[in-house]
Amino acid sequence: MASPLQFAYRTQKAIGVFDAAPVYESLPGFVQPEGNLRCTIYSPCGRYFAYATNEGVTVTDASVGHVLAYLPIQSVYDLGFSPRGTFLSTWERPAKDENGDATKNLKIWRTIEALDEGAEKQPLGRFVQKSASGWNLQYTDDERFCARMVTNEVQFYDSDDLATVWNKLRAEGVADFAVAPGMNRNVAVFVPERKVRTTPHLFCTLRTDFLHRANLLLSRCSMCRSLPPPSPRRHSSRVTRCS
Amino acid sequence: MQLKWNALGTSLIVLAQTEVDKSNKSYYGETNMYLLSANGSFDARVTLDKEGPIHDVAWSPNSKEFGVIYGYMPAKTTIFNHRAIPTHSFALGPRNTIIFSPTGRFVLVAGFGNLAGQIDVYDLEKDYHKVTTIESGNPSVCAWSPDSRYIMTATTSPRLRVDNGIKLWHVGGGIMYNEEFVELYNVLWRPSPPESLPVGDPLHPVPTPHASALAYLGTIKTPSKPAGAYRPPGARGTVTPLHFKREDEGGAAHVVTNGTPSIGPNGFGRQRHLVPGAEFTKPGIPGAAPVDGAEGEELSKTALKNKKKRNKKVKEGGEGHRGGVPVGPEGGLAPPPREAENGSSGEGRSPERRGLQHQHSNSQSRSNNNNNYPIRNRSNTHRARSQSRPGQRPGQYQQQPQQQNGSPQSIPQGGAPVGPASDAGQSANAKKIRSLQKKIRAIEDLEMRHAGGEKLEDTQMKKIGTKNSVQRELDALERE
């Protein structure tokens, strides 16, 4: 049976999950949390519903409302699921430890995992992520790979192994990137033009097949045609192709 | 800067915003849109046929087309195919949000934020047929349900702290559910994989709305007649002029001026001609259009009368009165308007200065008169002024330049110097008569008071004594 339409809401005091048409009633199994509630999110697949409080992060089954997992981490400001709901990312407020180093405030968790008795859930990976915008990893649709932007680089990881960088894409001054949905495994990278402030930008489309080591192939930026004649240095753009 | 992949990951829309707009038209900078295909076979800057910012871009879930809202308000909404070729344009309207339904069948085009919150729903499978327009109020959240049957709108905090709540609308336009919250922060649909969605026409049957929706419908007032924009009292009952209308209502397209008047340095004067209701018929070209006979004569009559009055004054006031006024053939007969009005003399004011004033008061017709002023002799100017004196009705101003510019012979005041002269004598007598009569009245009054036993001054007694002589004088004058 198709589950009814459902939406979740967050107010000043409570989080509710509501079954819309045709029943129009609150999800019976869902215990409404109260208190200081930070964020709510559904997994893109619709199976899970997670919310963050000051004390921790709770993952529930969106269909019935039962609690599936609980992460006792504090001051989580944002949550993110991978496309199929396998992984959950939490973003805490950036802070510093005793040595003055930034704490690793971005943590990736396996949403559902079989745990030994008494064992605590451990994150798959931790990163330092200061910016609150674009903080989350970007996954491919099949969740096999994920990518993260650092200074001048886009780093690719095998989703199961976030400790080692599997591959990286060097792009000087990269400002934004987007992993394409679908099965094509493309990534677009945006590198703003640096030296000339008034002329806006330089675009690169970067194709890469994550399965192979990407070969960088220099080609003319497709966008430059619409801009004034570019100097080759500034408008160097790359299209990487799979070998 | 936004990178938007389509669902298949084959094409990418790049929405780029620059910090500086080269054309200096917007401090938000320029927005440009590019379409790239992942395999490198296609890339282009999407050309948009309306000037202005890009408000929103969205891919259809079918990955083959995308919609763009662009241009100055009222914005244009166009659906492009994956080769950036426009396939359909919707009517212009105040819209800034476009969202395709998850099934790709519908698209909603809405105006939120500072716009009125109308949501147009179009059926893409029925040749972009408009399904409905929803008046959604002022939501900050708008989202399709995963099955494309419902649209959720919500007003959330902190964008608005009042009227927070969630509304569900059926795609056909009816409200299905309404709930109010105190400080709603966030609301979102539970995503649903496409395979679990129910099949069937989303438009039919229309589901029965929840009781809260009916309650909501009960509370909203029946839409009263739209009051419309404020009209100044003078313009009420008239049709809104075209240049006040929005482009989609038939007005002209918005032109960005960036504060600099596009109509040249004399912009103010020229713009005034556009003021609605002020029907300034432009005065004819000098000497070209003959004055309308009846009106012209009427006017000259009043002018004549005025002149007579002034003549008397001049005579009585003595010659020294008009020191600085150049005495042309008729100049003395028509003192400058300000003198007549204020009773003050024109001494110390140069005629040129007064000429300037005249020009000011006559600014409506200035453009046509400008060339004539230096040439025209002063007496003419004065006469013009005396004509314009009786009442400051603008209609007379319009008449006036035509008269001035007409040939001198045609001006009825040609005989004026003769008339007023004899006239002046008569009127001087009449005035004397009036003053004598007044004297007699005063004397009679004194006599009454004297008879009543009041004690009068010597001078008053003397005055009573002059009664006979005054009476004689009066009789003599009246006989004339």
Image (cartoon, coloured by chain):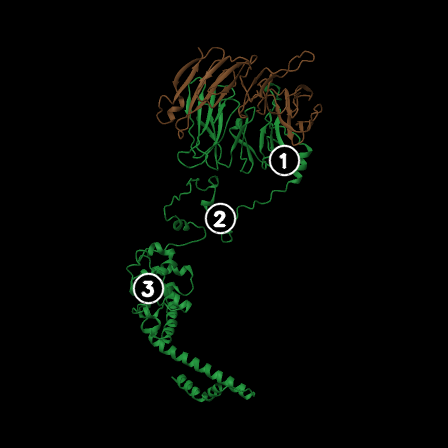
The residue at which mark 1 appears reads as: B164
Between disc 2 and disc 3, whose residue precedes? 2
Chain letter for the green colouring in the rendering: B
The residue at which mark 2 appears reads as: B239
Question: Foreground mark, 2 or 3?
Answer: 3
Chain letter for the brown colouring in the rendering: A
Q: Which mark is residue A110?
A: none
What SS does tag 3 mark? Answer: helix
Quarter of the image for residue A222 reads top left
Quarter of the image for residue B401 reads bottom left
Whether residue B410 can be seen here: no
Q: CA distance from mark 2 to mark 1?
A: 39 Å
What SS does tag 1 mark? Answer: loop
Q: Which mark is residue B351?
A: 3
Whether residue B119 can be seen here: yes
Q: CA distance from mark 1 to mark 3?
A: 72 Å
Between disc 1 and disc 3, whose residue precedes? 1
